[in-house]
Amino acid sequence: MRGVDMWILLMIIFSQPFEVGQVDILGTYADQDRCMSEHSRAIELETPQPASFGCIQLEGVHEINAAFHQRGDDVPMLQHDGHGPGGP
């Protein structure tokens, strides 16, 4: 079984110049274009500390949400108000 490809939008919050304090998954997407569209929205988020955002491709994923696998739907976690998991 080959699996499917998917894209993950990450937010990396730095606690010091070269130290990662936290990594959050803001959403998973069926294609790069959708992930990059959400990336554009995400970079406008106000974060309490310096942060970086990026889309990462995962190839050959075998165990994912059944709805995502069957329909190829996006599974966004970034809310429409621009806030991610845990609120503003």
Image (spheres, rainbow, N blue to C red):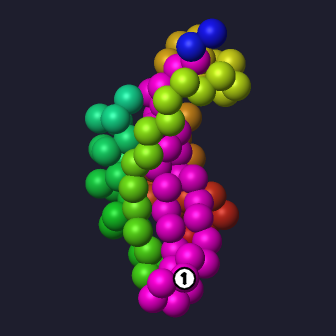
Observer-nearest of 77 and 49: 49
**Quadrant of the rendering where the C terminus is positioned:** bottom right
Residue 14 at x, y = what percent?
51, 80
Placement of 56 over or under 22, stated as above or below: above
Location of the N terminus by quadrant is: top right
> What's under tag 1, amino acid-wise?
Glu
**What SS does tag 1 mark?**
strand
How many labels sit on residues?
1
Q: Is residue 15 left or right of residue 65?
A: left
Tell me if residue 1 comes above or below residue 42 in the rendering.
Answer: above
Where residue 53 sits: x, y (%)?
40, 61
Q: Is residue 70 left or right of residue 40?
A: right
Determine if the magenta segment contains residue 8.
yes
Residue located at (50% from left, 67% from top)? 12
Q: Position of residue 3 (x, y in %)?
A: 58, 17
Residue wearing tag 1? 19
Q: Residue at x 34, y 35 (%)?
A: 32
Residue 48 seen in this snapshot: no
The secondary structure making up most of the magenta span is strand
Q: Is residue 62 visible?
A: yes
Vertical placement of residue 75 versus 66, above or below: below
Dot 1 crowding, Cα within 10 Å, few <14, some 14–19, many 20+: few
Which residue is depicted at the point 70% across and 25% down?
63
Name of the residue lying farthest toward the bottom: 16
Q: Is residue 87 magenta?
A: no
Specify start and end residues of the magenta stretch as a single range: 3-30
Q: Position of residue 19 (x, y in %)?
A: 54, 82
Q: Residue at x 53, y 52 (%)?
A: 26
* Viewer-closest of 14 and 88: 14
